[in-house]
Amino acid sequence: MAWRRRPEAGVGVRGALALLALAVCAPGARGRAFEWYSAVVSTEYVDPYTNRTVWSVSESGRFGDSSPKEGAQGLVGVPRAADRDPEGCAPDTRFLVPAPGGRGAAPWVALVARGGCTFKDKVLVAARRNASAVVLYNEESHGNLTVPMSHAGTGNIVVIMVSYPKGREIMDLVQKGIAVKMTIGVGTRHVQEFISGQSVVFVAIAFITMMIISLAWLIFYYIQRFLYTGSQFGSQSHRKEAKKIIGQLPLHTVKHGEKGEVEDVQEMPAPESTPGSVLAANLSITLQEEDRSEGNNLPSSSTSESALQCDAGFKEDAGEDTALLEMGRSDLEHGRPVS
């Protein structure tokens, strides 16, 4: 019997994984790429208590989405009513710009808090006051983090965001009348990819398809394995049945010199034919005695006596058989039935 090759379960799993990888790497699986630039913020001021210049620089800012990615500098100015309105949302907001030695300074950089109005409104209020750049500091709940800013329609004014601790530090200095010079530089370019909603659906469908294919292959694999194991068990059962039948067959020994055919062998009913089974007919195993030449090597006294007894018995049996045959032949010649 030719056995079919059993399927490999790993084939279905590998195919499903390839399908999922194709879905993820497909052009439609990825959404638009979003890029943003960090800003290098440098501050410089003179400490009135020690009369020493304090200078710091860090890449802690983030450029707005619609801001030109270029540098800017100037003295920092804050809303005059910063205690009551640090956001600078009012259209008539005026800014306090401390200058060293009381001299007027231009250009200048507006520093305002996040909240109260949109990013665009804040930028336009400062731009009307001829600010060269606008710096927003984040809310206190965000800690040292910065977030993306959308402010389309604000022109070519530079807009960045800094963290809440950095913004409050500069705000406190300016409110005390300390002139703070800020320099803004372009930092590192960051690229961040987003997956669109359609891509998520596509990947989900691919994943579900992978699971269905894997499950189908596993079911098919174990069914074939069960059938294969059952066929092997059936073959062993048939062999055991055949051995049992052969063991029940009668054994008849034919001695040397014995005539006639064996007619008293018990016939066994043949079992029903089943696939893979072995049918056995009545078997007769004949064991012949060794050659007379070998028998002659036995002791002469016992051998002679046995030979005489067997010869006498054989003659008597042969005579009876000859008489029966003669009687049967005469009956057939006279047309009588044979008894």
Image (spheres, grey):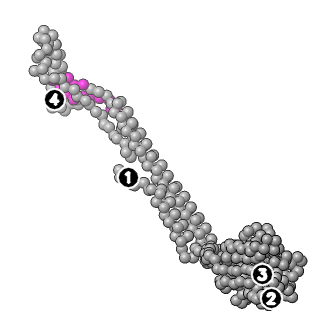
Viewer-nearest of discs 1 and 2 = 2
- The mark nearer the N terminus, 4 or 3, is 3
Q: Which residue is mark 4?
A: 329
The residue most toward the top is: 301
Range of magenta residues: 253-268
Q: Which residue is mark 3?
A: 76
Which of the labelled discs sits on residue 104, or is there none? Answer: 2
User: Distance from label 1 to label 2 (Cα)?
Assistant: 98 Å
Q: Secondary structure at mark 4?
A: helix
Q: Amino acid at mark 2?
A: Gly
The quadrant of the rendering that contains the C terminus is top left
* Quadrant assignment, res 135: bottom right
Badge 4: residue crowd in 10 Å (few <14, some 14–19, many ≥20): few
Between 162 and 153, which is closer to the camera in this rendering? 162
User: Distance from label 4 to label 2 (Cα)?
Assistant: 158 Å
Q: In screen coordinates, is 184 left or right of 50? A: left
Q: Amino acid at mark 3?
A: Val
